[in-house]
Amino acid sequence: MILTTLFPIFTSMNQLLDIQEIFFQKIKEKLPSNVSFVHEVSELLEISYDSTYRRIRGEKTISLEELFKLSNHFGVSVDSLFNVKSGNVVFESRAIDPETFSIKDWLKNIRSDINKILSAKEKTIIYAAKDPPVFHYFQFPEIAAFKMFFWGKTLFQFPEYKEKKFALEEYDQEIQKIGQQILIASTKIPTIEIWNEDTFNIILRQIEYYWVSGLFKHHNDIWILCDKLEKWIRHTQLQAEHGFKFIYGQEPHGIENSFQLYENEIVLNDNTIFVQMDGNIFTYITWNVISLLITTDPCFGEKIEHYLRGLIKKSILISSSAAKERSRFFNRLINQINLLKEKIERSMP
């Protein structure tokens, strides 16, 4: 069965082949630049390179079986191609799992995605942050070390963490290397972030929980973490002041107005991420805190963008010229760190 028998509403073969061309283009956009598009399609469909090229060039229409295989494997919505309003949206799932998909794998995928966004001529990210976006953590290895350990032990309960306590000295340096690459790329991508006080306070509650539960191997590590948290907040404040991101400890250089930070006081964010690059839309929905559902469905993406733009209108800009609001917001966060330190001091023998 070929594509023409599936969609008789299209009377023009040229129209069908145009859609087929768009379909293959969407697949190509989802692949890293170092992966052969033709090879991937050829392997999946178990056909020769010549047969693959004929389908890509529109010399041969694809079958129902091929359409299913391709759309399912690459996560390309067929509904969006034919403008069918079924209400269904195709997602690619990246679920953290101790047996099949580790946090390191998750970070490698983020690195691949962030580099793809970076390579686009026109790009932007809108991030409704329930937690600080992951690339922020890698400004300070100590903060990244705690978050990676917390996710592995407490959130996903990986077996290798069962008897372990947190220790800064045991941080996986390969994870930091991947994270640093993500951080560097992220500083070059225009980003709009929507925070509230809880965006930052979550990590304070996690640190306090570990302290109360006796999950610090060395007591001094908690003081180091608190010190780095304060430096992290002040650096984020400085980035917001400049209106662009840069690496901690380096001279502030960046793309003017490429970092817009908003405070929202009325809605709890959910880590929804909207990405637009060279006219293509990618939407990331988080579940189980950091597992991801990803779609390129344009109708769904447009609804997400509309919601996030509306949320921005109900938020307060605290980057660039908004000095008073920015100081108020970040001073409250510093105060929360001081309150945590006081709690810890009172609890010590």
Image (spheres, rainbow, N blue to C red):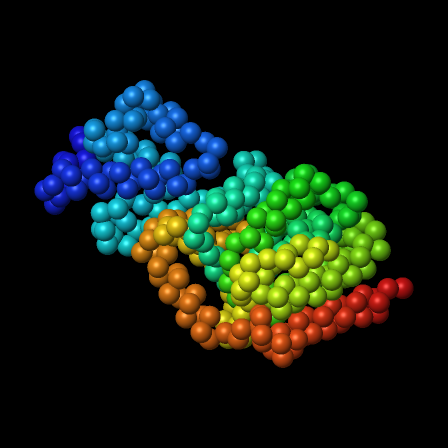
Q: Which of 59/78 is in front?
A: 59
State whether residue 119 is above or below residue 321: above
The residue nearer to you, when weighing 104 against 252, is 252
Which image quadrant for residue 4? Answer: top left
296 versus 36 height, above or below: below
Whether residue 263 is visible to the viewer of this picture, yes or no, is: no
Identify the residue at image location x=58%, y=76%.
322
Q: Is residue 9 above or below residue 343?
A: above
Q: Residue at x 52, y 44 (%)?
A: 115
Give whichever of 257, 109 is nearer the camera: 257
Residue 47, horizontal then vertical, whole percent? 31, 21
Q: Quadrant of the C terminus?
A: bottom right
Name the residue at the bottom extreme.
324
Q: Is residue 25 visible?
A: yes
Total marks shown come to 0
Q: Residue at x 18, y 40 (%)?
A: 16
Q: Quadrant of residue 332?
A: bottom right
- The location of residue 245, given as percent across then percent down, is 60, 58
Q: Position of residue 208 (x, y in %)?
A: 73, 62
Residue ID at (36%, 28%): 38
In the rendered structure, the answer to whether residue 197 lies left or right of residue 170 reads: left
**Which quadrant of the view contains residue 67?**
top left
* In the foreground, 326 or 151: 326
Residue at the farthest right position: 349
- Residue lying farthest left? 11
